[in-house]
Amino acid sequence: MGCTAERVAEALRAVARVVAEHRDELVRLDREIGDGDHGENLNRGFAAVVSKLDAEVPATPGAVLKLAATTLISTVGGAAGPLYGTGFLRAAAAVGDAGELDAAAVAGALRAALEGVVARGKAVVGDKTMVDALTPAVGAASAAVAGGDVAGVLDAAAEAAERGAESTVPLVARKGRASYLGERAVGHLDPGARSTSLLLRALAGSAR
Ligand code: ADP
Ligand code: MG
Ligand code: MG
């Protein structure tokens, strides 16, 4: 049994709640090495996604992900808006018009999302960005597919993303605003890596 459109919509509502709960934390992290808007931007974007889902839940998981993508692209702004938007758009394309998503489809969607973020932002692991959280998450998700269910795949992804986000603390940033700070970014958690780990943890919690 897989994840229906309704379940994917529920998962996005869970993401919106977690982003709202962590809005101030993300603002603080972005104030330290950026311009302080990451929490506000993401909170606005996911609140807009929930409003759209309240009006109507699209028929397939892919259509729900695509609605999230277009909404994030038009409401989040900054660096993260187009990056998350592209990630969701690629995830939507990867799942196609399937009526339900199984563990392999979810892992494939995460991989497609990473490829979209990298195609758009050109960051590699170690650049102190969301890619540092998403890359290990994708590896862990793929490894958890065999014998696992959707919740198991997302749990593995969230766990790896949390470690990946923590790994950004000692790094100098090579992409985004934090790259202007040089050595002064060292010792700070990257806000986008943190939001990626929160997003995956919310998805995992919702799948359980
Ligand atoms: P802005 O810096 O425009 O205010 P946000 O504050 O919303 O945008 O997002 C900042 C986050 O975006 C960073 O913490 C980082 O994780 C991510 N980011 C920035 N540039 C890139 C990039 N080229 N590739 C991947 N992620 C990036
Ligand atoms: Mg910012
Ligand atoms: Mg900004």
Image (cartoon, rainbow, N blue to C red):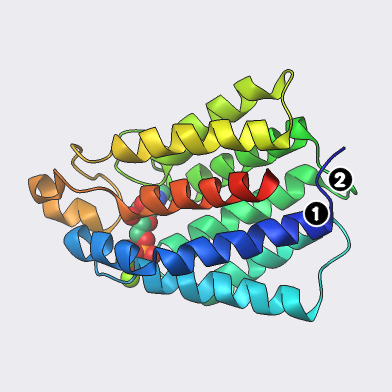
Q: Is mark 1 on a helix, strand or loop?
A: helix
User: Which residue is at the front of the view, 207 or 121?
Assistant: 207
The answer as to whether callout 2 falls within 8 Å of ligand 1 is no
Pick out the residue farthest to the front: 208
Q: Position of residue 128 (x, y in %)?
A: 29, 43
Quarter in which the C terminus is drawn: top right
Q: Where is residue 41 in the image (x, y as percent from the top left)?
A: 43, 72
What residue did someone put label 2 on?
A: 100
Residue depicted at 47% across the width and 72% down the height: 43
Residue depicted at 47% across the width and 30% down the height: 136
| Marks 2 and 1 in Cβ contact (< 8 Å) | yes
The answer as to whether callout 1 falls within 8 Å of ligand 1 is no
As shown in the figure, which amino acid type bears the numbered disc 2? Glu
Residue depicted at 74% across the width and 19% down the height: 147
Residue depicted at 72% across the width and 36% down the height: 150
Residue 98 in view here: yes
Q: What element carries label 2?
A: loop
How many neighbours does mark 1 have within 10 angstroms: few (below 14), some (14-19), or many (20 or more)? many
**Would you identify the image quadrant in which residue 94 lies?**
top right
Q: Position of residue 146 (x, y in %)?
A: 72, 18
Quarter in which the N terminus is drawn: top right
Q: How many labels does the image show?
A: 2
The reply, left or right, for residue 26 in relation to residue 75 is left
Q: Position of residue 198 (x, y in %)?
A: 46, 51
Residue 77 in view here: no
The reply, left or right, for residue 133 in relation to residue 206 is left
**Would you identify the image quadrant in which residue 79 lies?**
bottom left
What residue did someone put label 1 on?
A: 61
The reply, left or right, for residue 25 in relation to residue 178 is right
Of the two numbered discs 2 and 1 on the same chain, state the one appearing first in sequence: 1
Measure the alpha-carbon separation of dots 2 and 1: 7 Å
Q: Is the residue 176 above or below the residue 48 in the image?
A: above
